[in-house]
């Protein structure tokens, strides 16, 4: 009975795998971006700042910056939206699979619930009662399995287009700031470092990560890329 | 905490507009997305057209955006059609639009795409059907029941895990979760959605109660006789699914015509490509001419001819309070010859009416008796109680005070009243409730009456379902139009016959179970188009199976509304003849539009390509034809 559903694994191992599957489903395709329109915006600012710094150091002509910003806006909007849609499709596939499991493998789902709630300290009659109540309503059961087994969170993601707009706004902010900085001595350096530092700090604050280390790492990375560009250009 | 409801999401086919993973505030970004995108494409097209006169490069830039926004969805849909070996008008339009780029007519191609996308997305947003009938039935069907264990305690358990022979507790006001036999207690249950019977039924120990019935009065314990998968509600779900699957796939006239037309044009394009080089043109010239022919054979008038007509008709119907689930419904309705009406709730209002209060061997005033009945019924909520109260109000029956009121659930009511300076005991209820208190010769077993006993004075109360005022006129109009109305009901034969006579229908079928209705609808559908008009869950399989299902917006169950194609929002069945005429007119206008579009191809565009008429005249006639087609469709907006 369990072979087809648990694929020869113990219930606990199956639950661990399911959690990993859920976690993988919520991350972006390239695994670097944080989800949501807010973070798309920050990410786009950092990326644009670094790209423009490279282009500036490669002595890109000023008018080409405008074209570059426009094109990057379109690209980032499209790509960020597409990534959001891919994630949404994957989540929808997962929820459909879970519903199918609930409809066709009820006994195994019951075992999974028992294992989950045993791990939370339930046992004996109390455990059976909890499982009975959870199994009584399919909607409730699906919600529990998505949250407890797959580790997913409902109503947590922004619409892909909203996320795309976040990226578009990000490119626009970075583009305007850095274009203005083109006319100040060392302006692009200052602007790029400032943008990267501020957005890294804000992201860290939102995620409750250490702010200082995040800002320092991001500014250092930008400096590294900028200096490497200068030296490589000089060498070649 | 209430669990998250996933049913709507699954019923919508995993639509992102109801995705459980998106925050509720951001779901609105998905609303009418194709329509918004096509309007944006139209805006860019206008810019491309404006700049084409003085800045061709900027014009091309906007044109690129138009092709991206309107062209990609068209390509995706065309690829899907092509994968299914389906050559239709959509595929022809997409091909023509993209080919136009290669012969320097990008703006014309973009216009085709934009019109194509706008009309398609408008139709899609009008016909969007997010919920399915089965979902609402699943919502009605309880997912858990209170199982009574041997020690008398009860606990929640999923209905699908409850075995035959288990005991379950059904509380007052709840839906019966599984089919079973009453072990303890009694109550009246409402079966109106299951059988169409408006009168509540008394269920006592040993009686069978089907899943889906609503328990009106008191709790009882049921012994389960069928598992969840075999219950009455599950069988209803199966029947609806069967009905929907067996429904004849009605194709729009345009789709039928489009398949042949598109195949012909594509065939001729290839033919011209290979034939034209030999007599007079080179290979390059012949390809150019063949592609030009394909574009000429896909005029804007052909694109907008059908959608504008359907949308105008849908809009006109909406103003009358009729909701149509897509333009294709109009084509289907125009083919219907037979109109099957459900009785309870459709031809009748579904509300009980106290028809008469019959005195039996008494000189007691019926008006005072009505006042006494009302004084008892005032204490309970029940369809019969409401009918008595309404009639007492209508007749101006005197208000009486009842003392020592008590109710025997499922049987009747009792109390005492002061009448003519006497204190009299009063009883109102079923035959079983009264029979021990009256002489045997006055007892009429089997009669569908309620009895009122005031001291020694006995009255019979006869109830009936109220007929809709507009019913008779509607049926007469349908007969005048040469159509065949008939009644199909789950109610008994005498009630069906009575309603048929009162409303003027000669054909009626009674005592039909949902599966009987479904089979009859299937049989009649094969003999020609059939429209089914109903309101109950018991009608849902037939509504799903009929060529066109019509339900009533106020009285009908959500299941019936979802299974139907048309909803009469104000329950006004007198709109059915008007709607049928509108459907016929819409089909006629679509045909006229197609005729106009084809005339443009034959008489204007093709001669222009061959150089037989000047280009300026061809453009004028071409655009004029498009406007004419649009104006012709707008005639359907008229209310009459």
Image (spheres, coloured by chain):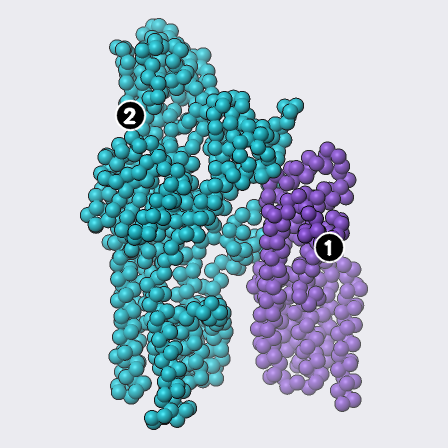
Chain colours: A purple, B cyan
Give the class, few, some or many, for how many residues have Cα within 10 Å of label 2's Cα (few <14, many ≥20).
some
Identify the residue at horizontal 59%, vertical 73% (top origin).
A75
Q: Which mark is residue B355?
A: 2
The answer to whether residue B622 shows anywhere in this view is yes
**Helix, strand or loop at disc 1?**
helix
Question: Spatial distance from mark 1 to mark 2, Cα to Cα?
Answer: 68 Å
Quarter placement of the N terminus of chain B: top right
From the image, tell me which residue sits under label 1. A17
Residue B377: give x, y in percent of width and height. Answer: 39, 21
Indicate the position of residue B395 as horizontal and vertical percent values: 28, 23
Q: Quadrant of the C terminus of chain B?
A: bottom left
Q: Chain of mark 1?
A: A
Q: Is residue B609 left or right of residue B227?
A: left
Asked whether disc 1 touches disc 2, contact meaning CB atoms under 8 Å apart, the reply is no
Q: Secondary structure at mark 2?
A: strand
The answer to which quarter of the image holds residue A51 is bottom right
Disc 2: host chain: B
Q: Residue at x 75, y 34 (%)?
A: A124
**Vertical placement of residue A81 versus B198, above or below:** below
């Amino acid at each position: 009975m369990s072979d087809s559903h648990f694929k020869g694994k113990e219930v606990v191992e199956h639950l661990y795998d399911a959690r990993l599957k859920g976690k993988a489903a919520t991350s972006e395709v390239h695994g670097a971006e944080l989800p949501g329109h807010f973070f798309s915006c920050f990410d786009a600012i950092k990326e644009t700042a670094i790209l423009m710094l490279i282009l500036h150091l490669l002595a890109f002509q000023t008018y080409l910056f405008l074209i570059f910003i426009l094109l990057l806006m379109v690209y980032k909007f499209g790509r960020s939206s597409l990534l959001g849609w891919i994630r949404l499709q994957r989540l929808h596939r997962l929820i459909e699979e879970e519903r199918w499991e609930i409809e066709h493998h009820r006994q195994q789902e019951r075992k999974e619930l028992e294992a989950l709630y045993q791990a939370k300290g339930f046992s004996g009659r109390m455990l059976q009662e909890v499982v009975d109540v959870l199994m009584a309503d399919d909607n409730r059961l699906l919600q529990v399995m998505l949250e407890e087994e797959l580790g997913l969170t409902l109503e947590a993601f922004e619409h892909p287009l909203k996320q795309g707009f976040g990226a578009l706004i990000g490119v626009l902010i970075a583009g305007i700031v850095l274009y203005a900085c083109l006319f100040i001595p060392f302006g692009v350096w200052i602007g790029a470092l400032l943008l990267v530092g501020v957005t890294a700090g804000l992201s860290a604050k939102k995620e409750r990560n250490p702010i200082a280390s995040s800002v320092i790492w991001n500014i250092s990375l930008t400096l590294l890329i900028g200096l490497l560009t200068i030296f490589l250009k000089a060498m070649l | 905490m209430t669990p998250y409801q996933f049913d709507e999401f699954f019923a919508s086919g995993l639509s992102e507009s109801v995705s459980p993973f998106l925050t509720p505030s951001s779901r609105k970004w998905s609303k009418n997305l194709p329509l918004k995108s096509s309007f944006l494409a139209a805006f860019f097209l206008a810019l491309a057209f404006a700049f084409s006169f003085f800045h061709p490069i900027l014009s091309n830039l906007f044109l690129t955006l138009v092709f991206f926004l309107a062209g990609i969805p068209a390509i995706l849909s065309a690829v899907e059609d092509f994968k299914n070996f389906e050559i239709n008008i959509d595929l022809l339009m997409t091909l023509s639009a993209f080919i136009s780029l290669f012969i320097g007519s990008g703006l014309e191609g973009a216009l085709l795409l934009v019109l194509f996308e706008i009309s398609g997305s408008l139709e899609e947003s009008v016909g969007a059907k997010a919920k399915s009938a089965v979902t609402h039935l699943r919502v009605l069907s309880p997912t858990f029941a209170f199982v009574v264990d041997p020690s008398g305690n009860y606990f929640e358990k999923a209905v699908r895990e409850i075995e035959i022979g288990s005991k379950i507790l059904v509380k007052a006001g709840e839906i019966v979760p599984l089919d079973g036999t009453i072990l303890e207690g009694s109550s009246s249950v409402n079966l109106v959605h299951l059988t169409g019977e408006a009168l509540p039924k008394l269920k006592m120990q040993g009686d069978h109660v089907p899943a889906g019935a609503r328990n009106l009065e008191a709790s009882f314990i049921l012994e389960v006789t069928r598992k969840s998968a075999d219950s009455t509600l599950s069988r209803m779900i199966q029947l609806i699914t069967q009905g929907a699957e067996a429904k004849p796939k009605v194709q729009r006239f345009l789709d039928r015509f489009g398949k042949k037309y598109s195949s012909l044009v594509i065939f001729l394009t290839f033919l011209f490509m290979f034939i034209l080089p030999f007599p007079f043109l080179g290979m390059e010239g012949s390809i150019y001419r063949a592609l030009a022919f394909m574009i000429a054979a896909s005029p804007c008038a052909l694109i907008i001819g059908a959608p504008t007509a359907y949308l105008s008709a849908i809009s006109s119907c909406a103003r009358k309070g009729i909701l149509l689930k897509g333009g294709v419904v109009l084509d289907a309705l125009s083919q219907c010859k037979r109109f099957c009406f459900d009785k309870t709730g459709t031809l009748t209002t579904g509300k009980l009416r106290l028809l008469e209060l019959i005195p039996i061997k008494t000189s007691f005033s019926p008006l005072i008796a009505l006042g006494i009945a009302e004084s008892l019924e005032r204490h309970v909520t029940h369809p019969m109680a409401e009918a008595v109260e309404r009639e007492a109000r209508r007749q101006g029956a005197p208000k009486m005070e009842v003392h020592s009121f008590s109710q025997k659930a499922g049987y009747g009511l009792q109390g005492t009243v002061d009448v003519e300076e006497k204190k009299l005991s009063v009883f109102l209820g079923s035959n079983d409730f009264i029979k021990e208190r009256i002489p045997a010769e006055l007892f009429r077993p089997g009669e569908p009456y309620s009895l009122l006993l005031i001291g020694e004075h006995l009255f019979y109360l006869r109830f009936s379902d109220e007929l809709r005022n507009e019913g008779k006129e509607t049926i007469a109009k349908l007969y005048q139009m040469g159509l065949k109305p008939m009644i199909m009901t789950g109610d008994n034969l005498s009630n069906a016959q009575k309603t048929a006579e009162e409303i003027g229908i000669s054909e009626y079928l009674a005592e039909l179970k949902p599966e009987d209705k479904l089979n009859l609808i299937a049989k009649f559908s094969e003999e020609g188009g059939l429209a089914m008009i109903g309101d109950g869950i018991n009608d849902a399989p037939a509504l799903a199976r009929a060529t066109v299902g019509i339900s009533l917006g106020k009285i009908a169950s959500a299941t019936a509304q979802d299974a139907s194609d048309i909803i009469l929002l104000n329950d006004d069945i007198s709109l059915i003849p008007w709607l049928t005429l509108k459907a016929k007119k819409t089909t006629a206008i679509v045909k006229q539009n197609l005729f106009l579009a084809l005339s443009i191809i034959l008489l204007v565009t093709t001669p222009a390509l061959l150089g037989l008429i000047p280009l300026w005249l061809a453009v004028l006639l071409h655009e004029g034809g498009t406007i004419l087609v649009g104006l012709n469709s707008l005639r359907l907006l008229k209310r009459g």
